[in-house]
Image: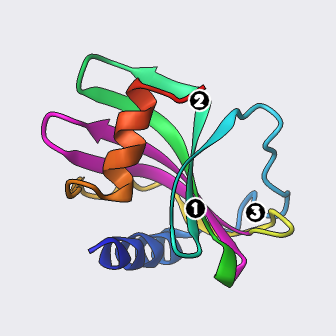
Amino acid sequence: MIRRIFVAALAAAILGMSNAGLAEPIDFADMDLRFVDAQGNTGYYVDMNSVQIKNNNEATARVEIVKADANCLYLYTIAFDRGKKTYQILDSIVAAYDTKEPTGGSQTPLKAQSYAKGSAMETVAEYIYSPQL
């Protein structure tokens, strides 16, 4: 299921990608990236400086997903709804992991997706509310 979600997100990023402003490497200086989970060669991180909690169920945060075996990172702004167990990618940047050079992305929000119990997205959503310091 997660693979299908990544493929859909990647396809949307490629279709919606704009070359404008993609020349500069991603600047992580203002981010407080915290490791949340890993599945195989894929790591999940939350930028705790970007977390905006609306209520006990709804929050928005920047999430970095690193696919080490593909030298690729995805930086998403995601809206989570723990009550509905959904997440919605609001925008994305795709980049080479080693250089942080953007290769694509999208400013077009995607349709909200459900996440399964025990999935990486559920772990990310729960981490936002109870970060492990």
Task: Give neighbour class at mark 1: few <14, some 14-19, many 20+ (Cα, 10 Å).
Answer: some
Image location of residue 113, percent across then percent down: 23, 57
Q: Nearer the viewer, mark 2 or mark 3?
A: 2
Q: Position of residue 105 (x, y in %)?
A: 57, 64
Going by the numbered disc 2, the residue's amino acid type is: Met
Front label number (1 vs 2)? 1
Instruction: Magenta stretch: give its range.
Output: 70-96
Q: Nearer the viewer, residue 127 or 26?
A: 127
* Camera sees residue 61: yes
Q: Along the horizontal axis of the image, is 26 left or right of 79?
A: right
Q: Which residue is mark 3?
A: 22
Q: What residue sits right under mark 2 in the picture?
A: 48
| Residue 8 position in % (x across, y down) | 35, 75
What residue do we see at 29% from left, 48% from top? 87
Q: Main secondary structure of the magenta part?
A: strand
Which of marks 2 and 1 precedes in the sequence? 1
Q: Is residue 106 above or below residue 72?
A: above
Task: Tell me the crowding category of disc 2: few under 14, some 14 to 19, or many 20 or more residues within 10 angstroms, Cα based.
Answer: some
Q: Amino acid at mark 3?
A: Leu
Q: Indicate left or right for 120 with 106 as reference.
A: left
Residue drawn where x is 48% and y is 51% of the image: 91
| Mark 1: amino acid | Gly
**Quadrant in the picture for residue 127:** top left
Q: Is residue 88 visible?
A: no
> Residue at position x 60%, y 25% from top?
133
Q: Which of the pair 85/37 is nearer the observer?
A: 37
Q: CA distance from mark 2 to mark 3?
A: 24 Å
User: Is residue 71 magenta-colored?
Assistant: yes
**The furthest residue to the bottom:** 70
2 sits to left or right of 74: left
Q: Quadrant of the N terminus?
A: bottom left
Q: CA distance from mark 3 to mark 1?
A: 23 Å
